[in-house]
Amino acid sequence: MSKFATATKRLVLGRPFRSDRLAHTLLPKRIALPVFASDPMSSVAYAPEEILLMLSVAGASAYVYSPWIGLVVALVMVAVVASYRQNVRAYTSGGGDYEVATVNHGPRWGLAVGSALLVDYILTVAVSIASAAANIGSAVPFVATHKVAFAVAAILLLMAVNLRGVRESGTAFAIPSYAFVAGILAMILWGAIQTFVLGDAPRAESADLELVAEEHHLTGFAFVFLILRAFSSGSAALTGVEAIANGVPAFRKPKGRNAATTLLMMGTLAITMFLGLLFLANVTGAVMAEHPGEQLINAPEGYEQKTLVAQLAGAVFAGFPPAMWYVIFFTGLILVLAANTAFNGFPVLGSILAQDRFLPRQLHTRGDRLAFSNGILFLAGFAIVLVIAFNAEVTALIQLYIVGVFVSFVLSQSGMIRHWNRLLRTETDPAARRRMRRAQAINSFGLFMTASVLVVILVTKFLAGAWISIVSMAAIYFLMGAIRKHYDRVAQELKEDESEPVTLPARNHAIVLVSQLHRPTLRALAYAKATRPDILEAVTVNVDDADTRRLVDSWDKHGFSIPLKVVESPYREVTRPVLDYVRRIRGDHPRNVVTVFIPEYVVGHWWEQLLHNQSALRLKGRLLFQSRVMVTSVPWQLESSKYASRRAEAAHPVAGDVRRGLFDLTRGPDGGGKGQGSGR
Amino acid sequence: MSKFATATKRLVLGRPFRSDRLAHTLLPKRIALPVFASDPMSSVAYAPEEILLMLSVAGASAYVYSPWIGLVVALVMVAVVASYRQNVRAYTSGGGDYEVATVNHGPRWGLAVGSALLVDYILTVAVSIASAAANIGSAVPFVATHKVAFAVAAILLLMAVNLRGVRESGTAFAIPSYAFVAGILAMILWGAIQTFVLGDAPRAESADLELVAEEHHLTGFAFVFLILRAFSSGSAALTGVEAIANGVPAFRKPKGRNAATTLLMMGTLAITMFLGLLFLANVTGAVMAEHPGEQLINAPEGYEQKTLVAQLAGAVFAGFPPAMWYVIFFTGLILVLAANTAFNGFPVLGSILAQDRFLPRQLHTRGDRLAFSNGILFLAGFAIVLVIAFNAEVTALIQLYIVGVFVSFVLSQSGMIRHWNRLLRTETDPAARRRMRRAQAINSFGLFMTASVLVVILVTKFLAGAWISIVSMAAIYFLMGAIRKHYDRVAQELKEDESEPVTLPARNHAIVLVSQLHRPTLRALAYAKATRPDILEAVTVNVDDADTRRLVDSWDKHGFSIPLKVVESPYREVTRPVLDYVRRIRGDHPRNVVTVFIPEYVVGHWWEQLLHNQSALRLKGRLLFQSRVMVTSVPWQLESSKYASRRAEAAHPVAGDVRRGLFDLTRGPDGGGKGQGSGR
């Protein structure tokens, strides 16, 4: 052994990339915007509507408050965007809120952020798909009458696409996102021109309906409560802002600054669309009732309330239906894209949590299709449960939403304040200190705003559904804590123990399990010999007297230099006699090691696995429970194994790749950009 | 290696039996009768009733044919019992009809018998439980109104008991079986005494009901068809006779003769009970309608037709209800026992089919709880489907039944005729020849009778449901054929090939996979050294730069004589970089063998398995696809593995043990009989 140097070599594989593999490709801002902003921008499709629906409880007169509520939401949005511009400059590794909370408040708080975001991803899917169903239902009545079925089918479709491994590309995001933004902005602009320039304001189809308040005599306190509730529903417009903070590594350099600029662009667009839609709703006189059947007394027979976006598009583009269809179609599409975002973000977050051992370790490795699949199934399953339980009603689902996001906002912003405090303690350059002070002030303002909103949300939504989210977060929090504890305990158990040095085994007693004398057995015998054990013997279990006799005869005829021992098994068991035998030879020489060679068939189809290896697998599993026993599989590749081998060679993309800056080489946004080599 | 003798040693383990293990214990006739005859005897609980129900279609006047039909069924029973007495003397190994058909007609016919019996086991469960529900429902109205639910619950209970592993004992069978026989015989006897001695024949509760024919003007041919249909339903009394043929090994010596005597006892009892019940039905004037609601025009409001056994017990024991309850209770119990019989017989038959490689090989080993469990789940699942699909109606289910049994009868009896022909060809002793001729005549008579019945069944029941059974048999037949073909192809592929001798590998290149420097890794390194490979190196995958740097530092500090190689993994994959690395070192030296040592954690709970070893397992699975690679698991037993180890030590009995002559040592029928040593 001494002829090998003790120096550690760093080995770089010769051909690190194949044509079917992925390479790091960084996103320009014009692509990063649609990739990361589809989620926050899509929420303007339902947030303004939810404000009107909440206000409708107090009657149409309450609509006068909607612009003011909109302005406050916009103010919070400004504060959040400004704060996150600090975050992305300070933390460019992509850990997002989780990282900020962990570094500045400790891992327990980071875990709280992780739990909150996991729950929120599920709700993003449910809310976005429910809203997509409502919007598409406004144009296609069949979808409206089968809303739940449509939503479930859409989630199943997204699940299937993500399980299969969709080749994400920036283009796939860019076109619908920009088309949506362009459509909404054009609608707002044309509506404004009609109103102010042509002096002929568009009228919504519901403008003439008479809205009856559900609660007629709201006292002062109850009325304030209603306003606050409308405000917290409108805050749904802020969801998804943190997505960019998780995606910093995918930006081109300087990453932090580019991400900050993209955040600014996203914020500007989202606020413009959000306020513009509220303005149009005011101008067109659109009437949205929380319970249309009861509140709209002069509605025509069979009146189906359309979504706000659909009504506005219908009013503004009254003379040109294709434009209306365009707006509704791209609104539905961006909502589906937002749901898909959750399918991508969920496994990425899971992988970050797994790195810190809060989730099973294998979630951390990108290649683990199974782990990713489980995550996707989990996400889809829970989203479907929510959609069915809440009848695909956005208004009901939104009560559960955003509490998670705001928990994350608050912990992240307060973490940033600590971050600056820490830096300020050592920083002496006055200019740098000034910059830090300013950034800290922005984060403090962000904390103040988001904490206030969180309190409003908790007060106004707790009983309406937020408690479900909070209970779920707590459950996930404790589960992840328990997983971490388990890993820590195991790590402690496994730590190198100086007092108990690992000794070199005295002798290696090898046994080869033999059932028949065929080529896999011969190979196993040859390999076992090649390991030059101190003792080598073949062992067979006598399950059938006639078979055993045949085996013994051909063994003797063959003239092996290895003795064959026959272990009796009166009940045709295989496992227990071998276990007993190994226990005996192991017991005789306590410093010996026993190596058990098991010839194994490698097959190509799952059903072949049912027909082969079952005894070997069970035996292997049981043998490992004995100490000082090694189990060696000597594979024999059956012809059919080639199929499986070929199948496994075909690499699939994995959900979330684009968000991590991993792109398909052949179809990346740069149009077949070359890989950046193997550097990291 | 040469210091080891090439002689083959037969090793007998020192302590072959523990107190919690099983031993061979052979059954005396008085125990064998209830163990094997509960199934055939229980069928008298529904066979006479089905005759009356079929006849009822033509009105009460058709009841006059019931004694004659009963006599023909009894005649067939005599023929079958006489035939099987020949079978059990000639074939004592327990293969039953399957063996007889395989040996005398070839494996394809044996397979047909196997398929037929597998289907029949499912129907035994469905019919017996449905009949049990009807009988118990006759005493407990709640069961009658929830018949399907009761039947499904009973099957699930049997399933659970058999999955858990019930400690079968002869006593558990003996008491209910003898109690049932005693009850029925006492009922018949007391009914006869009332009729003939006291001159006061008992009257059934339905005796005064007026039965209206469903088909009023049956033509001659249609009437014959009806009679034949009633006959074939009555033939259900013959099911289960073959059970004793499968159980010969469990009998005391002389096995064949004892089994033949037991068959005779069973046949006598079954015929007596069967004819006795038909006699009582005649005497008491019991009226059984196939569709009580339509056919019984003067029935009182809410009349629920009870089973024949319940009506007869009510009539005979009119003055003493406890006796009536006794008969009904033990009738229900023996029917449940008969269903349990199928739960025991199904895995035994599966194990015989697996021995001939028609079913996955692991079914052959007794110890395989998983395989047995799958068989039990399969049986229960299909029985539940049948019970629900046919609304737990015995009359409907019985149309699917017995076609399988009679296919098996016919193939077995015709096989026996060939058997005697073969023996007669060489036999010269006149006395022996005479005996054989006589046995052959008996089997020929059996063949004639069973073939006739099979034709009648096929003609009268094909459209009524038997086609379902036949299609199922065909499907199972082809599936088992395909499995056998697969095993044959693999065996061909694996056969020792003289032209391609297995060469001893030139060099053994060992690599130890390292993720951290903890005790499992140290042990793996020590073990790998102990196998004295030609090249030994440690390999780690760089998933995380910081972790890898830490590992490399402590490696260097430790001063190992083994070099540590770092394999780059730009995408945090573990599997692929290792596969590529192994492929490279394997490729460099085509006659080398690569041994990959994987440290593995052994855990005690299934959820821990989710948290550990996932990467190792996947890697192992993929490595085996490469030729000339051995994979060695070096286990590290975590503290928690002790639980699992303890759990696995507790041996459970397996369904079907009693039928194979395997008995619990502590609770066997001999009251703790001593094991027969380890001899076979």
Image (cartoon, coloured by chain):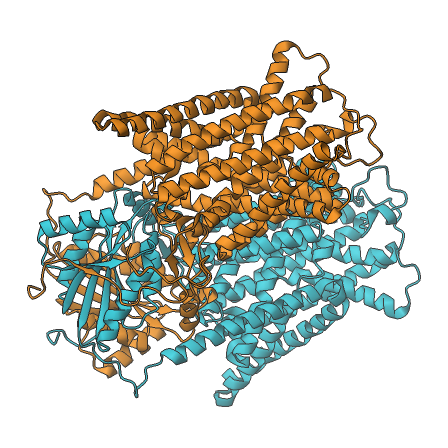
Chain colours: A cyan, B orange
Quarter holding residue B409: top left
Total label count? 0
Is residue A518 something one can see in this rendering?
Answer: no
- Percent across and percent down for residue A680 are 34, 65
- Percent across and percent down for residue A570 are 31, 56
Give the farthest residue toward the right.
A217
Left or right side of B416 for A305: right
- Percent across and percent down for residue B458 are 51, 22
**Residue B583 to residue A532: above or below:** above
Q: Which residue is rendered at x = 50% and y = 42% of the image?
A: B37
Q: Which residue is rendered at x = 69% and y = 50% of the image?
A: A392
Which is nearer the eye, B261 or B167? B261
**Residue A135 to residue B416: above or below:** below
Give the farthest residue toward the left.
B2
Which is nearer the eye, A516 or B25? B25
Q: Quadrant of the N terminus of chain A?
A: bottom left
- Percent across and percent down for residue B134 are 67, 40
Quarter holding residue A462: bottom right
Left or right side of A27 for A679: left
**Residue B375 to residue A228: above or below:** above
Which is nearer the eye, A465 or A407? A465
Left or right side of B67 for B86: left
Which is nearer the eye, A165 or B187? B187
Left or right side of A597 for B191: right
Is residue B346 something one can see in this rendering?
Answer: yes
Quarter holding residue A511: bottom left
